[in-house]
Amino acid sequence: GNSVTQMEGPVTLSEEAFLTINCTYTATGYPSLFWYVQYPGEGLQLLLKATKADDKGSNKGFEATYRKETTSFHLEKGSVQVSDSAVYFCALSGYTGANSKLTFGKGITLSVRP
Amino acid sequence: NAGVMQNPRHLVRRRGQEARLRCSPMKGHSHVYWYRQLPEEGLKFMVYLQKENIIDESGMPKERFSAEFPKEGPSILRIQQVVRGDSAAYFCASSPGLAGGPYEQYFGPGTRLTVT
């Protein structure tokens, strides 16, 4: 079955530091890949997505590239801010029907200190 | 345009009681997904519904849990005879569900269930 593996956390960075959060996946076929962010006490918000190999998703300074050869979708940001402190989830899904459900990694907590 | 709405936001039940969690999808969305987030774990898929139809319930525990999405009204996740292990955050997500996906799933704020 499908699975997503994220690097262990938590991660603590100083403001303006470079961020990398690793994500690898196992799936049949050609899944779509997502990064979701969850702020304290809130639901999940889609941060970015990529639907095919070599696609790059980007939003709010965050980027991730769909690497089929390494089955990875690592999240990066060049300069983090305190407001980026949240829990980040990597996820995948198929296209339609029963395959459209999301499979999530365990999530990683990012804390950015001023 | 209102987002996905869930209520209640917090629910406390004693062991053995029933819990009913409601989810109203975004306007125009006809597909609903329920996920559960246990402490220190990621989100796990529970069930996927269209109006009046369960598409995939492979993530639902076999006993005590049920879900519906009637023609009119919100989707309901029902947990009968709750136990302490049911304490978790339950999230609902909706999508348009049209052909030619995949479509983004929009999440509600969640219902945090505490069983005492």
Image (spheres, rainbow, N blue to C red):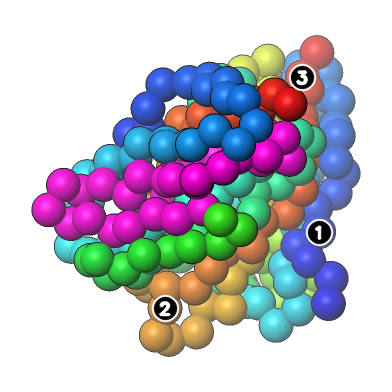
Residues beneath discs 1 and 3 located on the same chain: yes
Q: Residue B5 carries which label?
A: 1
Magenta-colored span: A62-91
Task: Mark 2 and mark 1 in contact? Answer it, CB < 8 Å.
Answer: no
For the point 36% across and 65% down, which residue is it? Answer: A56
Label 1: element kind: strand
In the displayed structure image, the side of residue B76 where residue B97 appears, left or right = left
Q: Measure the alpha-carbon separation of dots 2 and 1.
A: 23 Å
- Under mark 1, the amino acid is Met
Quarter of the image holding residue B29? Answer: bottom right
Task: Mark 1 and mark 3 in contact? Answer it, CB < 8 Å.
Answer: no
Residue named by callout 2: B101
Give the image location of residue B42, x and y in percent: 51, 33
Q: Measure the alpha-carbon separation of dots 2 and 3.
A: 38 Å
Whether residue A26 appears in magenta in the rendering, the answer is no
Residue named by callout 3: B115
